[in-house]
């Protein structure tokens, strides 16, 4: 992967801070699912965890962009890690896991535009694909180790004991320490110096301004194409995170902690794909990765019907690698065009709104399918076909041609 030479100290400090925060986020999901199971709640509550976590991304999208532009972004990220700690304290106090996890999501919603916006401010356009490759490796590495850490923390054999707390409560204390470490690491991230016109944080004007920004990004050739791809990718991906956990338990006979380890295979693949994208795909060629979306959908269908763990592991790695190759260039292109058309915070807020609205819709559909007892294998196959057909539609439409012409004109 290409090296980031400009402002490397601040960029790598940002990577380290975001890694610790994302590591805790991913481990917390497994721990919170275990809390639901301990309370005897039905299966369809598990996707509602992610639903509640993601809801803030959608409802607060008009606010978090201007908020990220109004204060130094590293400082805001430290504050949001503090808010995540409050969410864990709420779980320890007996608040319902979905409600407490939603509070953690509120912190994550404001964290995201600050994180991506800071990358855009710190680095030149020519470094964005490489930077996104590094960032994606950090995010997916945190997902890989986070799911493993979560599986370890809920494993009955561990017998975790911390400050007099045992079991899942001790696990929550350990994750609070990770969030505190992330907040401390933010102190090493420099202020980019970027400043934007002051905006009053009033709901109605913010919604109007946000909606104008939303339409402007969708109507742009490169921005609209990349936004369509990332919106679809993250909606399907978030839903498949739960589907694969249930698939591993029901189809392969794995326990929750071992099923969490299985997700690490996908993360390894995404790291490999993200690294390859950062090294070999230039920003102006980002649109060329779109056929990989069709392949990704086909791999998901194939995975659903894989009969054994021996076949599932390499297929999960390949699926992750194709996903990394697809989403990293698209994400970099979207950030680049968003920064040109809007501002760093606003463009990421628009991106987050669309991607997380997709997550909400697909998680709601998945939870409804579980409540209706739809068979798992046809359900996973349906998600795979959805992404393949949608990518085919994008390829056959005029968006790819217009994006290619726009890239050549830049």
Image: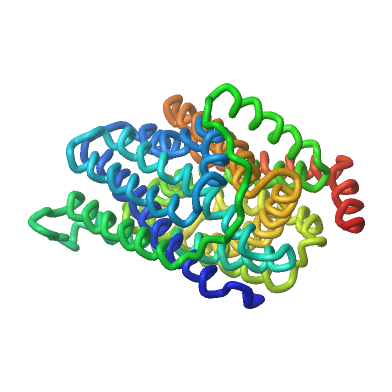
Residue 396 lies, in percent from the top left, at 86, 43
Q: In this view, does 126 lie above or below 260?
A: below
Residue 346 position in % (x across, y down): 62, 42
Q: Is residue 207 above or below residue 340?
A: above
Near-viewer residue (268 or 84)? 84
- For the point 53% across and 46% down, the residue is 68
Q: Which residue is drawn at 76% across and 41% down?
A: 224
Instruction: Tell me which residue sits at (64%, 58%) in the image.
Output: 120
Q: Quadrant of the C terminus?
A: bottom right
* Residue 360 image offset from top left, x and y in percent: 52, 33
The picture quadrant where one finds residue 397 is top right
- Name the residue located 27 percent from the left edge and 54 percent from the top edge: 176
Quarter of the image holding residue 94? Answer: top left
Q: Which residue lies furthest to the top in this view?
A: 204
Tell me if residue 362 can be seen: no
- Residue 377 shows up from this direction: yes
Quarter in which the N terminus is drawn? bottom right
On the picture, is 104 further left or further right than 40?
A: right
Q: How is the image coloured?
A: rainbow
**In the image, is 162 to the left or to the right of 128?**
left
Q: Which residue lies furthest to the left in this view?
A: 164
The x and y percentages for residue 73 are: 50, 53
Q: Which of 302 and 22 is in front in this view?
A: 22
Q: Count every numbered label the image shows and give the total.
A: 0
């Amino acid at each position: 992967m290409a090296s980031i030479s400009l402002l490397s100290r601040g960029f790598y400090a940002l990577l380290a801070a975001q890694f610790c925060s994302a590591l805790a986020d991913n481990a917390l999901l497994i721990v919170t699912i275990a809390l639901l199971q301990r309370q005897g709640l039905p299966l369809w509550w598990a996707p509602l965890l992610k639903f509640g976590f993601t809801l803030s991304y959608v409802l607060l999208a008009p606010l978090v962009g201007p908020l990220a532009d109004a204060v130094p972004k590293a400082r805001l990220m430290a504050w949001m890690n503090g808010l995540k700690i409050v969410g864990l304290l709420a779980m320890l106090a007996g608040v319902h896991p979905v409600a407490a996890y939603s509070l953690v999501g509120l912190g994550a919603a404001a964290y995201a535009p600050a994180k991506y916006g800071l990358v855009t401010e710190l680095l030149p356009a020519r470094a964005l694909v490489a930077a996104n490759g590094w960032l994606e490796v950090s995010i997916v590495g945190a997902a890989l180790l986070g799911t493993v850490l979560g599986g370890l923390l809920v494993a009955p054999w561990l017998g975790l004991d911390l400050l007099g707390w045992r079991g899942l409560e001790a696990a929550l204390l350990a994750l609070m320490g990770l969030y505190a470490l992330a907040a401390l690491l933010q102190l090493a991230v420099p202020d980019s110096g970027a400043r934007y016109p002051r905006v009053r944080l009033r709901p109605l004007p913010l919604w109007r301004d946000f909606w104008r920004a939303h339409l402007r990004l969708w109507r742009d050739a490169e921005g609209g194409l990349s936004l369509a791809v990332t919106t679809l990718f993250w909606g399907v991906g978030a839903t498949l995170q739960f589907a694969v956990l249930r698939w591993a338990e029901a189809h392969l006979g794995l326990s929750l902690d071992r099923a969490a380890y299985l997700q690490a295979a996908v993360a390894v693949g995404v790291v490999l794909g993200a690294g390859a994208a950062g090294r070999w795909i230039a920003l102006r060629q980002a649109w060329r990765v779109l056929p990989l979306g069709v392949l990704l959908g086909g791999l998901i269908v194939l995975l659903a019907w894989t009969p054994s763990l021996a076949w599932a592991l390499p297929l999960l790695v390949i699926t992750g690698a194709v996903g990394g190759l697809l989403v990293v260039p698209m994400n970099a292109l979207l950030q680049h065009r968003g920064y040109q058309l809007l501002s760093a915070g606003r463009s990421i807020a628009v991106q987050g709104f669309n991607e997380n609205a997709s997550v909400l819709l697909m998680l709601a559909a998945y939870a409804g399918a579980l409540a209706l007892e739809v068979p798992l294998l046809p359900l996973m196959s349906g998600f795979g076909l959805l992404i393949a057909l949608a990518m085919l539609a994008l390829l056959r439409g005029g968006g790819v041609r217009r994006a290619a012409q726009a890239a050549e004109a830049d």
